[in-house]
Image (tube, rainbow, N blue to C red):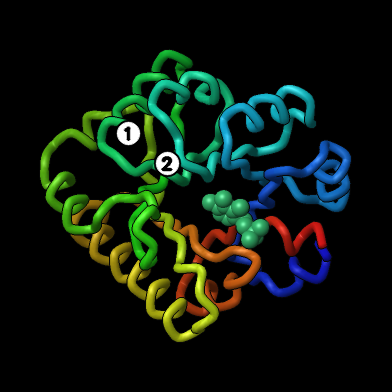
């Protein structure tokens, strides 16, 4: 399905191929068709795959990340989509500095209905960003936002949630990142809802199951 999926994604939208539970062979199959950006939602799997698979793969961390595990992925991770606390932001900066590199991050913001969804509450995030410290963190690049819609079949609801994330992005951009060209990404959309996400302004889609079906 790789070619079919690719043909439905506009050129200015990036595809993160989500490899959770996939074999190295399956991943290499996509690699050989030209895919270079891959995403994992667990630290251990990310580490293992990065060690074995081609060195020019750009690895993205997309799942919940515990602070004490940042050190394992800091040497190589290209972007972390799932940054959802200020403490985690500081830890990513610290570990990036240790590795003498810059790590790109997205701020994960709650949009879906489910209680368990991780992510910043938008109002709390706004309050926190009104402080001074983000600009003090020299080893991270805040590139935008990430969110997950509710797992429902109601397309109208999904569309509303994605539009909400787009408006959060616009607000953060104008309040805090207006002079920062790197703050430009909205990571939203998975196998079941990526077309809606693109209509709502997504710049990065994270697709797993559909690519491998
Ligand atoms: C698994 C996962 C995806 C991809 O989900 P599919 O439905 O398989 O496309 C995207 N984002 C996150 C955070 C995931 O954990």
Residue 61, labelled with which disc?
Answer: none
Residue 182 in view: no
- Residue 40 x, y percent position in the rendering: 62, 41
Q: Is residue 131 above or below residue 209?
A: above
Q: Residue at x 64, y 25 (%)?
A: 47
Percent x, y for residue 133?
Answer: 18, 33
Q: Residues within 10 Å of mark 2 (few under 14, many from 20)?
A: many
Mark 1 and mark 2 residues within 8 Å of each other at the beta carbon: yes
Instruction: Indicate whether 176 appears above or below 210.
Output: above
The numbered disc on residue 105 is 2
Say whether disc 1 or disc 2 marks the residue closer to the N-terminus.
1
Give the image location of residue 34, x and y in percent. Answer: 81, 51
Q: Quadrant of residue 149?
A: bottom left
Determine the residue located farthest toward the top in the rendered image. 98
Residue 36: percent from left, percent from top? 72, 45
**Label 1 sits on residue:** 89
Label 1 CB less than 8 angstroms from ligand 1 = no
Quadrant, the N terminus: bottom right
Mark 1: few/some/many CA within 10 Å (<14, 14-19, 20+): some
Q: Quadrant of ligand 1?
A: bottom right
């Amino acid at each position: 399905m790789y070619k079919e999926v690719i043909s439905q994604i506009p050129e200015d939208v990036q595809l993160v191929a989500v490899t959770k539970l996939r074999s190295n062979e399956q991943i290499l199959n996509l690699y050989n068709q030209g895919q270079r950006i891959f995403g994992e939602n667990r630290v251990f799997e990310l580490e293992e795959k990065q060690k074995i698979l081609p060195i020019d793969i750009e690895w993205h961390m997309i799942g919940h990340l515990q602070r004490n595990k940042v050190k394992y992925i800091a040497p190589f991770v290209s972007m972390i989509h799932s940054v959802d606390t200020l403490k985690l932001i500081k830890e990513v900066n610290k570990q990036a500095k240790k590795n003498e590199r810059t790590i790109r991050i997205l701020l994960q913001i709650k949009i879906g209905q489910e209680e368990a969804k991780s992510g910043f509450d938008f109002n709390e995030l706004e309050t926190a960003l009104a402080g001074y410290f983000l600009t003090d963190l020299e080893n991270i690049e805040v590139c935008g936002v990430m969110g997950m819609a509710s797992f429902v079949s109601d397309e109208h609801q999904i569309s509303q949630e994605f539009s909400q994330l787009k408006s959060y992005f616009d607000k953060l951009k104008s309040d805090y990142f207006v002079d920062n060209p790197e703050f430009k990404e909205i990571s939203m959309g998975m196998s079941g809802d990526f077309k809606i996400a693109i209509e709502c302004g997504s710049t990065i889609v994270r697709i797993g199951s559909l690519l491998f079906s």
